[in-house]
């Protein structure tokens, strides 16, 4: 079996007295597109946040390649997130004052890349994704679907090893949602980027290679059927 | 309905029964809109008997099928179990048979959750195939795939909701 790029073992995490994860186990292979499904409150977003090093679990282990994420300091996790991970959320992740191209360049600037190089990479990516026409527009001048496609470009620009997407089409109509998913999944596959997408929608999960279901804070793999 | 034989087997499994009792039970659970005709009950039981899946356990004095008491055989239990374990081929408008399987699993003390899980996996697999078709096909094919996708998604929502209600259902109907 190949080494997984992400692995959670017996992860628990509570918020005050409320347990969100109760011993979650998961492995994600490099290059895989994985859907994490489950009813609201099942712990699926908490699992994503633990895998991405945003939250530290109360117990258990979280591995990214050969690094133990849950043992890293807050600062090291932040640095690792910027370098290795991209994120797409449901709402409001673009900086309203900045045009699309600058929003896309942001992760590169935060990683210390020179301004000119960052903007050139951002423009190149927008072009490749068919979004060049949006480069000069501010988020307020974009439709929901366009803004979300720009957010996908931003998640991809630093060529992360993993993209985490939490309900990436939750606020979109079906057709716009489809365009966002096509873009995300096609580009990720082309770059060999692993995708972990949290969703409660089966149509979104159908873009993935595999799905797991989180129930009451535990991960269940669905039986593979022919 | 295509699953009348397995439904009768499921109703017979807890205890032997007469045809008219089976019909009454069937109609209460599954036949709200379309009660099962007596003729179909007896012809189905006759076929199940011929195939060794039920036996006549006893008959009251007099003639006619309505006097016979039927019991399920090991072969009948095997057929029922296989049917309950197998996901249905995902296609739109499956609701009736999915519902019958959940109820029969509960009534017979088997895991309805396990059935719902394999069915969910089968549905998602079909949705993945349709999603791939949509990427390549002509627009007409895409629109047709959309139709199937939305219906399968509706099934899945029902599967999820029913899974969430299983504890309650088991309390009411479980063995």
Image (cartoon, coloured by chain):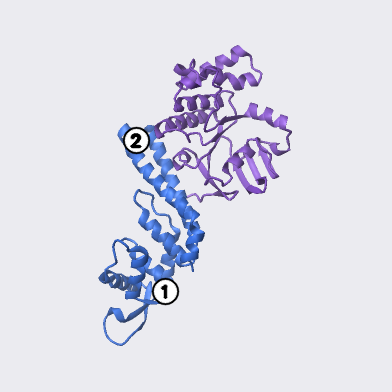
Chain colours: A purple, B blue
Please check whether the numbered discs 1 and 2 fall on a single chain. yes
Q: Secondary structure at mark 1?
A: loop
Of the residues tagged 1 and 2, which is closer to the observer? Answer: 2
**Mark 2 neighbour class, 10 Å CA radius: few under 14, some 14 to 19, many 20 or more:** some
Gap in Å between the C-alphas at discs 1 and 2? 48 Å
Q: Does label 1 or label 2 sit earlier along the sequence?
A: 1
- Which residue is rendered at x = 59% and y = 14% of the image? A117
Q: Is residue A226 among the parts visible in the rendering? A: no
Q: Which residue is mark 1?
A: B73
Return the residue nearer the eye: B64 or B106: B106
Q: Position of residue A44 (x, y in %)?
A: 57, 43
Left or right position of B20 against A59: left
Question: Where the N terminus of chain B falls, by quadrant?
Answer: bottom left
Left or right position of B105 against A161: left
Q: Secondary structure at mark 2?
A: helix
Q: Which residue is mark 2?
A: B142
């Amino acid at each position: 079996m190949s080494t997984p790029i992400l692995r959670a073992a017996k992860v628990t995490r509570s918020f005050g007295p409320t347990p969100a994860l109760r011993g979650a186990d998961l492995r994600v292979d490099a290059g895989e597109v994985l859907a994490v499904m489950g009813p609201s409150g099942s712990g699926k977003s908490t699992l994503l946040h633990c895998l991405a090093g945003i939250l530290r679990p109360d117990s258990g282990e979280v591995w990214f390649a050969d690094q133990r994420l849950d043992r890293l300091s807050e600062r090291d996790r932040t640095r690792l997130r910027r370098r290795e991970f991209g994120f797409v959320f449901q709402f409001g992740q673009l900086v309203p004052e900045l045009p699309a191209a600058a929003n896309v360049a942001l992760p590169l600037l935060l990683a210390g890349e020179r301004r000119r190089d960052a903007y050139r990479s951002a423009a190149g990516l927008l072009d490749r994704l068919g979004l060049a026409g949006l480069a000069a527009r501010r988020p307020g001048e974009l439709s929901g679907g366009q803004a979300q496609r720009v957010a996908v470009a931003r998640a991809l620009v630093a060529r992360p090893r993993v993209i985490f997407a939490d309900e990436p089409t939750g606020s979109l109509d079906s057709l716009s949602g489809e365009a966002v998913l096509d873009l995300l999944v096609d580009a990720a596959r082309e770059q060999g980027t692993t995708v972990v997408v949290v969703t409660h929608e089966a149509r979104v999960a159908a873009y993935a290679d595999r799905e797991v279901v989180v129930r009451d804070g535990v991960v269940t793999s669905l039986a593979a059927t022919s | 309905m295509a699953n009348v034989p397995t439904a009768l087997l499921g109703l017979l499994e807890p205890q032997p029964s007469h045809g008219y009792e089976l019909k009454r039970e069937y109609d209460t659970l599954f036949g709200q809109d379309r009660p099962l005709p007596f003729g179909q009950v007896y012809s189905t039981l006759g076929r199940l008997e011929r195939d060794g899946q039920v036996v006549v356990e006893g008959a009251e004095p007099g003639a006619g099928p309505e006097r016979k008491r039927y019991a399920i055989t090991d072969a009948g239990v095997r057929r029922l179990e296989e049917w309950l374990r197998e996901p249905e081929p995902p296609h739109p408008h499956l609701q009736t048979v999915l519902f019958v399987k959940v109820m029969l699993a509960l009534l017979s003390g088997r895991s309805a959750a396990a059935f719902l899980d394999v069915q969910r996996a089968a549905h998602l697999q079909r949705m993945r195939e349709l999603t791939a078709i949509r990427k390549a096909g002509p627009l007409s094919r895409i629109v047709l795939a959309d139709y199937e996708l939305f219906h399968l998604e509706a099934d899945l929502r029902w599967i999820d909701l029913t899974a969430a209600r299983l504890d309650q259902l088991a309390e009411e109907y479980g063995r």
